């Protein structure tokens, strides 16, 4: 198993190269191995283009390597139906490989396990569930979207140790350090869409672009402002910039809007917002995961702005609980993440 995990880890590394470019498809990596030698590598680069397995076979051929009798490691169960590209099971069957090692199965109930049956019926050995948790986590947004029809929503908050996101006058730059802000760039690269509230849009004048260290814009995700004053917000939008404005006043509105976005192939949403919108999304059970960046600073002040606003609960039983909690340090700041468990 240790050897299987070693090569699957390499496939995961390759898969991550598709961050921000494969949606609405998942990120997938593949490694072809024979007698301890890697013959070919591949990953899904962009939606509509070759899948990881096909790219790995092409890489092996380019290097003059014969894959007959080799093993292929792939982070996600190979596709077994033709879409914009041919089925990967067909390419595997034609390649002559003797074993397929899979990280996790296809989450779509219509396809889950189908590739395994096709390959095994053809006499190919199949091993699944290698580094399964890591492979599932890699594409948690895609898996949520494909099974629910709604995008996966990640609420990101930068706050002080005492839970404040800004001074009473709205000043918030910068609560966290450069390393944590670089992490935000990765999250924006991951996201199909970034959402914020009207106050943040008006006061902070955010761009929500993905930029490198030189300030070069690498990506502009779809940008949506949630506000109760849609028409006036539209008038204040900078000329030439593409922003959308929507009013989401209750849980039903959130549900309808998320389904609409899902039907438009939006698989992931990053909520970068203030306390009011954060509370609205949580109360609507729209948030799937949170990532709070906590700076080692104490701001204080009764009028300083809280990270999550809304009505005050009367007991701790009303608190939102988190599962699969992780802690990561970025410079001096601590990132606290977890899946939201709704009652």
Image (spheres, rainbow, N blue to C red):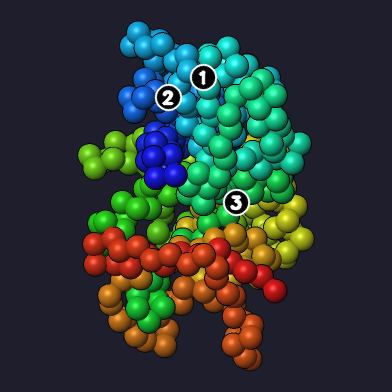
Please give the name of the residue rendered at 59% of the width and 87% of the height, measured from the top-left corner.
Answer: 316
203 relative to 192 in the view: left or right:
left
Q: Is residue 14 left or right of residue 88?
A: left
- Tell me if residue 94 comes above or below residue 18 in the rendering: above
Local crowd size for mark 2, using a 10 Å CA cut-off: few (<14), some (14–19), many (≥20): many
Residue 343 drawn above or below residue 149: below
183, 209: nearer the viewer? 183
Q: Dot 3: what SS? A: strand
Q: Is residue 61 visible?
A: yes
Determine which residue is flagged by label 2: 32
Q: Name the residue tied to disc 1.
A: 97
Spatial CA span between label 1 and label 3 = 35 Å
Q: Where is mark 3, residue-wise? A: 152
Seen from the viewer's position, the closer of residues 25 and 179 is 25
Q: Nearer the viewer, mark 1 or mark 3?
A: 1
In percent of width and height, residue 128 lies at: 57, 40
Residue 191 is labelled as none
- Image vertical order of residue 180 relative to residue 220, above or below: below
Which residue is at a point 46% across and 73% down the rendered structure image? 307
The answer, for residue 219, to whether it is visible in the render is no
The picture quadrant where one finds residue 31 is top left
* Crowd tier of the residue under label 1, counting other residues whose Cα lies within 10 Å: few below 14, some 14–19, many 20 or above: many
Mark earlier in primary sequence (1, 3): 1
The residue that appears at 66% across and 27% down in the rendered structure is 120
Measured from the top left, where is residue 105 in percent x and y?
62, 40
Judged from the image, the secondary structure of the residue bearing numbered disc 2 is strand
Q: Which residue is situated farthest in the bottom direction here?
A: 314
Contact check, label 2 and label 1, Cβ < 8 Å: yes
**Residue depicted at x 24% and y 62%:** 331
Quadrant in which the N terminus appears: top left
Q: Quadrant of residue 107?
A: top right
Seen from the viewer's position, the closer of residues 160 and 330 is 330
């Amino acid at each position: 198993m240790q050897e299987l995990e070693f090569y699957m880890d390499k496939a995961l590394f390759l898969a991550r190269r598709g961050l921000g470019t494969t949606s609405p498809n998942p990120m997938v990596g593949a490694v072809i191995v024979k007698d301890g030698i890697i013959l070919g590598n591949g990953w899904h680069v962009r939606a509509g283009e070759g899948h990881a397995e096909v790219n790995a076979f092409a890489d092996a051929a380019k290097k003059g390597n014969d894959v007959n009798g080799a093993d292929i490691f792939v982070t996600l169960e190979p596709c077994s139906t033709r879409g914009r590209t041919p089925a990967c099971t067909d390419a595997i069957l034609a390649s002559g490989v003797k074993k397929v090692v899979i990280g996790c199965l296809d989450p779509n109930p219509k396809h889950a396990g189908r590739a395994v049956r096709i390959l095994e019926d053809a006499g190919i050995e199949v091993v699944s569930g290698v580094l399964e948790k890591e492979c599932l986590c890699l594409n948690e947004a895609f898996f949520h979207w494909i099974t629910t029809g709604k995008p996966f929503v990640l609420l990101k908050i930068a706050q002080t140790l005492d839970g404040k996101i800004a001074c009473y006058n709205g000043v918030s730059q910068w609560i966290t350090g450069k390393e944590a802000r670089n992490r935000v760039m990765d999250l924006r690269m991951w996201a199909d869409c970034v959402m914020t509230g009207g106050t943040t849009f008006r006061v902070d004048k955010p761009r929500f672009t993905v930029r490198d260290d030189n300030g070069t814009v690498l990506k502009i995700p779809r940008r949506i402002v949630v506000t109760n004053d849609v028409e006036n917000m539209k008038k204040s939008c900078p000329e030439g910039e593409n922003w959308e404005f929507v009013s989401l006043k209750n849980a039903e509105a959130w549900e309808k809007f998320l389904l609409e976005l899902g039907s438009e192939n939006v698989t992931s949403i990053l909520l970068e917002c203030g306390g009011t919108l954060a509370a609205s999304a949580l109360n609507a059970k729209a948030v799937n995961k949170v990532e709070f960046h906590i700076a080692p600073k104490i701001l204080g002040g009764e009028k300083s702005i809280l990270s999550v606003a809304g009505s005050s609960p009367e007991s701790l039983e009303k608190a939102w609980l988190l599962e699969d909690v992780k802690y990561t340090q970025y410079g001096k700041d601590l990132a606290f993440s977890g899946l939201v468990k709704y009652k």
